[in-house]
Amino acid sequence: MSATTATSTVKTTRFWTRAHGFGIFYLTVALITLVAALTRVSPDTISRLGLGVIGQPPPVRISFPTQLSLVIIGVLLGLAGLYSLVRPIGEREVNVLLGFSFGMIVLAALVAAAADKSIDMVGMIKDSLRLATPITLGMLAGVMCERCAVVNIAIEGMMLAAAAVGYMASLYTQNMWIGLLVAVLAGGVMAALHAVLSIRFMVDQIISGTVINILAVGVSGYIRTAFLLKNPFGAPGLFPYVFQKTPLWDIPILGAILFQYQPMVYAAMILVPVVWFVLFRTPWGLRTRAVGEHPRAADTLGINVFKVRYVNVILAGCIAGLGGAWFSLETVGHFDDLMTNGRGFIALAAMIFGNWNPIGGALGALLFGFADALNFKFQILEVGVPYQFIGMLPFILTMIAVAGIIGKTTPPAADGEPYQKQ
């Protein structure tokens, strides 16, 4: 019986793979694209994608027939689906086809949205980078925690508390930099609470993170009601653009993509390689990863497991606090209840998407940022799809990443396990 069962299991595994599942998905999307192109788009409809400087008419417009473009994309997706179903392919080919097909799906969405209209692609890229900022910072906080085996689902609460406290400090001092510092410290304080609960008292880390998220909702709501709604100071304004008064600002295309941002976007760009370098190229990073993989062995070698975990979790909270300040101090200049809108949880999905690596996680955050930018662009263009469905796209991508559909991910071996010194 065992031999027969093992043989049937092997055959079943070989018969149905990720490639087959993606193949069916590609064929389904291809069919929808072809049917929509042939039945709902006129042959003389033109789509336009523009390249240029933000706020000015794009000097370059690429025009192409909408129907023909969608038909070509549908055919390419159909070929990718057939290839995935018919030929036995390895994981690398599956991921290459996934990237190609995802690019085709995004291009199809842009072409359809630009029918008889124009989409500024430079603006899309810029918005994607900007909207990816809090997700990137939250992702870095998650990586730093889980690399030392502390699960941190409290990133959402840390960012929310930091957004409220930082804005309050900025409002009452009329100094945004003080507000930013207070936001970072608020994130660190919330992280310290999570560290004490999960490391010192060995509370279940999921429960601890949930408690902090609930606490942040209550604290931020109280701050808004008691201190922010009726204040005599007025709004403190927003952070200035870093390169606005320099020649870099006016460089065609590259100036808009690289140099037209506020400080925290650049902070996220800098922190990604910094955190990667610390984790993978320094003795501290080696100790952190050792604690995350096998804390008992690390302790035997003289590494202070508790110190490593405390330091990483608190620093991660400070980074999450920086992400919280992005919402209230850099984006809108005020604080609203629940304004983080689930970005802390999306950051965890980006972390999983990137396999607990800051570089891969940043790419995942950029993907989610692009989904957000696409949502806003579709609403502006009044695409004939309910905006609620378009707004679901980042969260659908989150479920896909967490479910492991993108590919196999491997967390640190001791992730989520409390450590008790013998």
Image (tube, helix red, strand yellow):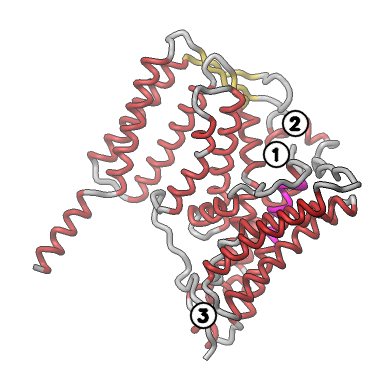
Residue 30 in the image: x percent, y percent?
A: 35, 28
Q: Which residue is drawn at 68% across and 30% down?
A: 253
**Helix, strand or loop status at disc 2:** loop
Q: Give the range drawn in magenta.
A: 318-329
- Answer whether labels 1 and 2 touch (C-beta < 8 Å): yes
**Helix, strand or loop status at disc 1:** helix
The residue tagged 3 is 295
Q: In this view, does 115 lie above or below 267?
A: above
Q: Which of marks 1 and 3 is nearer the N terminus?
A: 1
Residue 44 in the image: x percent, y percent?
A: 46, 8
Three-letter code for the amino acid on which mark 1 is drawn: Leu
Based on the picture, tell me whether residue 325 belongs to the magenta stretch. Answer: yes
- In which image quadrant can residue 31 be found? top left
Q: Which residue is drawn at 65% across and 49% down?
A: 338
How far separated are the C-alphas under marks 1 and 2? 10 Å
Three-letter code for the amino acid on which mark 3 is drawn: Pro
- Answer whether labels 1 and 3 touch (C-beta < 8 Å): no
Q: Tell me the chief SS of the magenta region.
A: helix
Q: Residue at x 59, y 77 (%)?
A: 199
Q: Is residue 273 above or below residue 254?
A: below
235 with respect to 17 (left or right): right
Label 3 crowd (10 A; few <14 / some 14-19 / many >=20): many
Label 2 crowd (10 A; few <14 / some 14-19 / many >=20): some
Is residue 265 at all visible to an observer of this figure?
A: no
Q: Which of marks 1 and 2 is nearer the N terminus?
A: 2
Q: Nearer the viewer, residue 392 or 347?
A: 392
The residue tagged 2 is 251
